[in-house]
Image: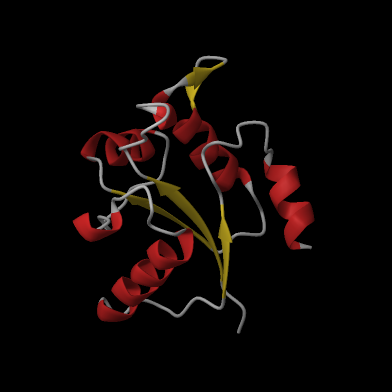
């Protein structure tokens, strides 16, 4: 069975642009835009946030995406790869007896022009 996860990586410690995921465009933060776009998609079976920040987790919850997963400290470095973060999240899911995921679509908050239709077209 195919289960598609929309995965939003949002580390709080940006070196080049501090707080970048909270920057607003058109009255919404980059993180809020990503969460809302993912929630509006019709092709994602689940959506998950990976963050080290309580502020980011609260923002996602306010935007409609509650989260229980907290990214571990050893994955909060600028040199950490997206695949390492995804694999950690998938391992966390297995440890919590959650359904398996077959495919992952990474949704970077730094792509604010992406629309739910873009996600759905890319998946199809």
In the displayed structure, 28 sits above or below 30; it is above
Where is residue 67? Give x, y as percent.
31, 52
33 left or right of 116?
left
Q: Name the image colouring.
A: secondary structure
Seen at 34% across and 40% down, the residue is: 61
Observer-nearest of 115 and 87: 87
Q: Position of residue 42 (x, y in %)?
A: 66, 54
> 79 or 44, which is in the foreground?
79
Residues 22 and 19: in front is: 19
Image location of residue 117, percent across then percent down: 74, 44
Farthest-out residue, top: 27
Q: Quadrant of the C terminus?
A: bottom right
Viewed as shown, does residue 25 lie left or right of 42?
left
Image quadrant holding the N terminus, namely: bottom right
- The residue positioned 28% from the left and 51% from the top of the image is 76
| Residue drawn at point x = 41 percent, y = 72 percent | 87
Where's residue 108, x and y in %? 54, 45
Q: Where 92 sits versus 79, above or below?
A: below
Q: Nearer the viewer, residue 42 or 71?
A: 71
How many numbered dots are placed on residues in this image?
0
Q: Residue at x 42, y 40 (%)?
A: 64
123 relative to 62 in the view: left or right: right
Residue occupying the far bottom of the picture:
1
Give the answer, above or below, for where 29 lies relative to 75. above
Q: Which image quadrant is residue 60 in? A: top left
């Amino acid at each position: 069975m195919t289960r598609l996860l929309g995965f939003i990586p949002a580390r709080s410690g940006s070196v080049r642009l501090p707080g970048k995921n909270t920057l607003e465009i058109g009255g919404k933060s980059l993180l809020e835009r990503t969460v809302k776009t993912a929630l509006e998609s019709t092709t994602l079976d689940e959506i998950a946030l990976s963050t080290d920040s309580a502020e980011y987790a609260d923002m996602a919850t306010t935007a409609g995406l509650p989260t229980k997963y907290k990214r571990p400290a050893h994955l909060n470095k600028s040199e950490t790869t997206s695949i390492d973060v995804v694999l950690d999240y998938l391992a966390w899911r297995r440890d919590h007896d959650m359904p398996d995921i077959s495919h992952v679509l990474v949704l970077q908050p730094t792509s604010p022009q992406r629309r739910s239709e873009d996600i759905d077209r890319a998946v199809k």
